[in-house]
Image (cartoon, rainbow, N blue to C red):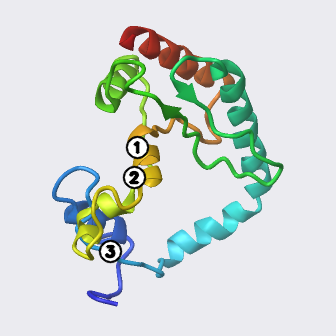
Amino acid sequence: MPNSRSFNCFSETPSNLAIREMEKPCDHRSVRIFVQTCDVSAAIGIAQLARLERFNARRGALARRYLEKLGGVSGLRLPAAGHAGHAWHLFAPLVDFDALNTTRERFIQAMHARGIGVGVHYQALNLFEAFRRLGYRAGDFPNAETIGARTVTLPLHTQLRDEDVERVCEAVKASVRQAK
């Protein structure tokens, strides 16, 4: 593994390195796999395993609330309802930005203006510089590119309250109305 080394939990972590490796937002320049963790992270992870079932149940309840409140919103394609084992680590609807006459950037700005953080996940790997260096090009994986360009992630974590989900859903609906 290139550039492999040990990391001190409190100074230089793999995530800090990844941030510095990004020349422009969301474009990774190199591919690295890190399998090490520090003792503190391991201890936290082990302690949280006892709560995993409760965490998954709470995220599942929040996801069902999102599905209920955002069902039928024009321009949104919601994730499948999932099955009993779905962990709902993200809630990632696809947004048809063209149909809404907007861009992902403007949609995210509209959500931020309403006090809601929105993430971007699942970008097509062939569009990252690290994979372009390996010969991959735009157009190699059109489905992944379409999904990557249209996906946003809404807040979803175990500390989210039901009223927070209501506020997020109202912000999504208002941002969609504003875009039209």
Kindly indicate the quadrant of the structure image that contains residue 32: bottom left
Q: Is 55 displayed left or right of 9 in the figure? A: right
Q: Are marks 2 and 1 in contact (CB under 8 Å)?
A: yes
Residue 26 higher or lower than 45, as above or below = above
x, y percentage for residue 147?
47, 45
Secondary element at image label 1: loop
Residues 40 and 26: in front is 26
Residue underneath mark 1: 120
Kindly indicate the quadrant of the structure image that contains residue 167: top right
Number of marks in the rendered image: 3
Per the rendering, the mark at residue 31 is: 3
Q: What residue appears at the point 45 percent right and 37 percent down from the top-left corner?
A: 152
Kindly indicate the quadrant of the structure image that contains residue 98: top left
Secondary element at image label 3: loop
Other-residue count near label 1 (Cα within 10 Å), few / some / many at <14 / 14–19 / ≥20: some
Residues 55 and 91: in front is 91
- What is the CA distance from the residue labelled 2 to the residue labelled 1? 8 Å
Q: Earlier in the sequence, mark 3 or mark 1?
A: 3
